[in-house]
Amino acid sequence: MSQKPNYYVEHAPQADLDMIGIFDYIHSKSRDLLTALGVTRRIEKKIEILEHNPHVSELFGKDTYRLIEYPYLIFYTINEETKTVSVVHIRHGAEQEFLPRS
């Protein structure tokens, strides 16, 4: 029996595009569907943690948090009034720095 989530987690359109890009890149380089699925599933499992504890990671900017699923960085915001976590961007740590909105 799983515990009921405390927060609703949603993905911004950019985060969805990021996940597709990560999958496509890994699949094109490895030519292995299971490897690409495994990496994206690992990222999704990390995001699921936010349903119960969105404050598990560090504040990165004014209102953006950064969660690490090495080597990927997951950026998100929290709306305490609606108990909603919005995943706004996911990227490889070696990519150009993400600057959250001020």
Image: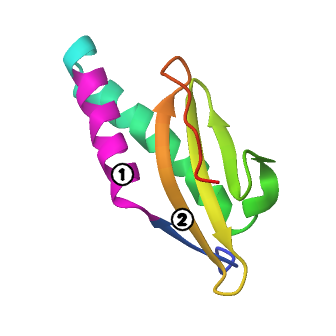
User: As displayed, is residue 77 above or below residue 74?
Assistant: below
Instruction: Tell me the SS state at disc 1.
Output: helix
How many residues crowd mark 2 within 10 Å: few (<14), some (14–19), many (20+)? some
Q: Is residue 26 visible?
A: yes
**CB under 8 Å between discs 1 and 2:** no
Q: Amino acid at mark 2?
A: Ser
Q: Which residue is mark 1?
A: 14
Residue 40: image quadrant is top left
* Residue at image coords 63%, 86%: 82
Q: Which residues are magenta?
A: 11-27
User: As displayed, is residue 17 above or below residue 6?
Assistant: above
Q: Which one is nearer the viewer's eye here, 22 or 99?
A: 99
Residue 51: image quadrant is bottom right
* Residue at image coords 64%, 73%: 2
Q: Which one is nearer the viewer's eye here, 20 or 13?
A: 13
Left or right, 67 with respect to 90, comes to right
Residue 86's disc number: 2
> Percent from the top left, x then y, of residue 67?
67, 43
User: As displayed, is residue 69 above or below residue 13?
Assistant: above
Residue 37: image quadrant is top left
Residue farthest to the top, as pictured: 29
Instruction: Tell me the SS state at disc 2.
Output: strand
* Residue at image coords 58%, 58%: 48
